[in-house]
Amino acid sequence: MYKKLIKPIFFLFPPEKVHAWVMGTMNGLMYLPGIKTLVQKLFQVKHPVLERELFGLQFPNPVGMAAGFDKEGKYYNTLSAMGFGFVEIGTFTPKGQPGNPKPRLFRLPEDEALINRMGFNNSGALRAVERLKKHHPQCIIGGNIGKNTATPNVDATQDYHIAFETLFPYVDYFVINVSCPNITDMRELQDKKALLNILETVTTLNRQKEKPKTVLLKISPDLNQQQIDDTLAIVEKTGIDGIIATNTTVGRKNLTTPEKRLREAGTGGLSGSPIRKRATEVIRYIAQKTHGKLPVIGVGGIMTPDDAIEKLEAGADLIQVYTGFVYEGPFIAKKINKALVKRHKDK
């Protein structure tokens, strides 16, 4: 029903407006008597085989919502009711910022993909804390943090410091985002010296806490093998807890979307089906290189249960979706979890 009736209607309207309207409506409905319980019964799949223990956290299932979907930290409890085992909110910056000019989110239906150049639009880490305090999370929450667009790269470490300290009491794990292609010169922070400085700063702060939090690094699918090796060396040196592979890509190869519409969409990060294969390759390489000892959250092009299983078999411990939610509909977490239970029973 979603793909044949609802999605075609949604796709008539600008994607950013549809996203805000749909999730805002779902949030509002959750306050009506009995709706939350009904949603949980319709969407959630509970089975011991789905449960995961990772980073000292108990995940009810391995399917999470990737950062960027709940940029402001408004929808996490609704997404939990809809069957997601964890939700990553943000990216949050120390100061609020409007992001890039609109339009900045584009659909590529022929490729089951999105291009976004949102630019870390968010109201700031302090505002996120207000929401987290007001609406206590009912699921595991990840805090994705980055630098303000106006902050020069030479001062980026301070932004990560501030965002980390601000969010620390209110999230279960952190993700250091240095790989977003939508902030000017941000991906330069993936270079060895800059990345080492940021990660050492955050991990030093973390170790000073009475109860340190899990710290993960989100990497780009556009890194070559040497760059991945360099990153893994830094991960080992700083002692961070794991990798999220991968972010969006700046590449535009092998797309069926007409060139004219690609030019109209312009720059930004590409997500969805076109990056599935590359994201899986990166996950598999990291798992093999580290002998499966470094935890990996796999994300990128997960549109179907088979795509999710592919990521898990490649070495991912958990997975995240985003674009798959847009194209496959709100039951995507349920479909994946049901497939995982069936796969276990069929063995």
Image (tube, helix red, strand yellow):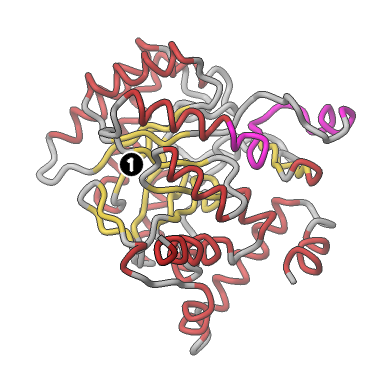
Left or right for 66, reference 316: right
Q: Nearer the viewer, residue 298 or 74?
A: 298
Magenta stretch, main secondary structure, is helix
Residue at x 31%, y 51% (from the top left corner):
171
The relative height of residue 292 versus residue 172 in the rendered view (above or below) is above
Residue at x 66%, y 41% (from the top left corner):
273
Q: Position of residue 141 (x, y in %)?
A: 36, 54
Looking at the rendered structure, the kind of residue marked 1 is Phe
Left or right for 241, reference 92: left
Q: Position of residue 37 (x, y in %)?
A: 46, 83
Q: Position of residue 140 (x, y in %)?
A: 34, 57
Q: Quadrant of the N terminus?
A: bottom right
Q: Which residue is mark 1?
A: 174
Say if residue 98 shows up in the picture. yes
Left or right for 134, reference 298: left
- Magenta segment range? 259-277
Say if residue 147 shows up in the picture. no
Residue at x 25%, y 33% (from the top left corner):
293
Q: Nearer the viewer, residue 50 or 267?
A: 50
Q: Residue furthest left?
A: 210
Q: Residue furthest front?
A: 347
The relative height of residue 33 versus residue 321 in the rendered view (above or below) is below
Residue 265 part of the magenta-drawn span: yes
Q: Dot 1 surroundings within 10 Å: few (below 14), some, or many (20 or more)?
A: many
Label 1: which secondary element = strand
Residue at x 44%, y 71% (from the top left corner):
45
Residue 152 part of the magenta-drawn span: no
Q: In the picture, residue 99 is in which quadrant?
A: top right
Q: Position of residue 332 (x, y in %)?
A: 58, 61
Q: Quadrant of the C terminus?
A: bottom left
